[in-house]
Structure formats: C-alpha cells, structure tokens
Amino acid sequence: MAEKNKKGLNLKLYGVFAIIVVAVILGALTVFTFTARYTAFDPEKTAVAYVDTIVQTGDGYNACKNTLLSKDMKFGDFIRQNYINPVIYENYKPGAGTKGLKGLNDESLKGEKNLNDNGELEGKVIDTMYPFFVNLIESNGGFDAYDAIFTQYISELQKVRKDVFGDTYFDDSAFFTAFEANLATYGESLTGTQDEYDKNTGVQTKVASVGAYQEKFGEDYKIEVVSAGKTENGENKCTVSVTVNVNGEAEVENLPVTLVKIGRSWYVDNTACDTSELYSFYK
C-alpha cells in the first residue's frame, strides 16, 4: 500500500486541524447521501456510483450507502445500532433505543486528559489507528467484510483511546471521528496530496505527497467507471457489469454488481459482490 508515501504534519498541528478536517468530510458525506438517493432509481447508475465511490479514493465505507445495508436506515445509524451501541451499553440489543441507558458515554467517565484535550490527543489517537486501519482494509480485501472491519476497529480504538486519554470513556463520536479521518488519509495515500495552508494563519495544514495511483498511472491520471450493460435476473433483481477505465484503458473489466429493487429504489446486494479487485488494480 502507498502508506510509504504518506507524509503527515507534526502531531500538534494535526491535532489542531483534525476536527476541522472531519467536519469538512461530514459535509461532503451529506452531498454524497443526496446523490445516492437520486441515482437509486436506476440500477446501472447505482452500480456505477457504488464502484466509482470505491475506486476514486478506496472508499468502500461510503459505497455502503448504495447497498442493502442502508435500505432501512441511514448507514451511520446502522453502525451505531449494530457495532457502537453494543460496546457502549451492557446487554444492548441492536435496534433497541438508548434513552435512559447509562454506559461508556457517561460524562463522568472522562478523565482530566480527555476533558482538557485541545485536539492534540485526539490527533494522536487518529494517527495511532491509521496503520491498523490500513491493515484491516488490506487483509480483508476492502469493505466486503464490513462486520470484521467495524468490530475489530472499534475494539482496537477503545484500547488506543484508553492508552492516550487514560480513561474508559467511549461514544459514537470517538468512532466516527477516528474512522473517517483514517478513511480520508487512506484516500490521499492513493490520490496524493498538494501543499495546503490555512488562509487565515498561513500555517501549513497539508504536505504534498505522491499517491499510489499517480505512481502507477501518472500525475494526471483519470479514472472513469462505466456500465457495460445489465442482465435481468427477475422482476426486482439484476446484475450490472461495471468496467473501470484508467487513462482510457480498462483496468477492471465487467465486474458483476448484483442489485435488488425495493419499492422504487435499487440497492447493491453487498452479500453477492466481490469488490476486492477494486483495491488492488493499481498494484
């Protein structure tokens, strides 16, 4: 993986800007959610959007918003109910409410370091978790094994936070802040980065680096994802063949994406798709 090309800021600067960066990411995710809903009426557009989200920045996480995992609720709520809440609240059952429950997100569990952190320690948590995040993605061949990824990441995150903050406090923000920051860095390890500076202070917030895509395909590479046609498997099911072109050449050909129609919307059947090739085509 292109982690060898990752150039970070010093820890203090990273801590200062970590929360700002995540806020920007969350804003972008709102736009993504709107787009996903718009494309859901067309199976080919849904399949293309699913694959495109993965290949552009290695983002299988947000690609899940095009899948059956998001048919009944927002993807963030799916993660809360099935992975975060069972850790926070003892004997919590997925789908149950949390009103009146007391768990690891009780403010009284916050230690002095946690209460007084200006973002520097949060930045240390994020940096410490990054190699673990990369290993999870590589060892699982992407996000198809989302259950293992979320379960193992949360378990490790609790240990790291305890080491850094010296307390047992844990909430959903702890997960989303660290995971989505790691996801953004992972994407930059593929696409590369440019020097960036805070417009108000002039402080450098990002250091230029060369990504894995640039190393393989050139500085001005262009990735295009297109549908190569669909096959009907019944009234409410189909398979779309998706091709990934880089600089006009097919790097992944006819990747089958199975979709299911529920109501008026199409969802990717994530249990019937193998996206591992999308995380290794550039190697």
Image: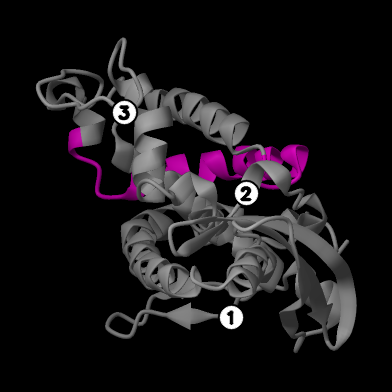
162 and 102: which is toward the camera: 102
Tag 1: amino acid: Gln
- Tell me where the magenta segment starts and ends, as one range: 115-144
Residue drawn at the location 88% of the way across and 61% of the way down: 283
| Number of other residues with Cα within 10 Å of mark 2, as a class: few under 14, some 14 to 19, many 20 or more | many
Name which of mark 1 and mark 2 comes first in the sequence: 1
Task: Indicate the amino acid at tag 3.
Answer: Gly
Q: Is residue 17 found inside the magenta-colored segment of the image?
A: no
Q: Is any part of residue 200 visible from this angle?
A: yes
Label 1 sits on residue: 194
> Which disc is residue 32 wearing?
none
Answer with the quarter of the image where residue 198 lies. bottom left
Q: Position of residue 84 (x, y in %)?
A: 37, 30
> What secondary structure is the magenta-colored segment mainly?
helix
Cα separation, mark 3 vs mark 1, equals 43 Å
Instruction: Name the spot of residue 96 as percent of width and height, x first.
Output: 26, 24
Q: How is the image coloured?
A: one colour
Residue named by callout 2: 269
Q: Where on the picture, by quarter, is residue 211?
A: bottom right
Q: Badge 3 local density, few (<14 within 10 Å), some, or many (20+)?
A: few
Q: Which of the numbered marks, if any, corresponds to residue 95?
A: 3
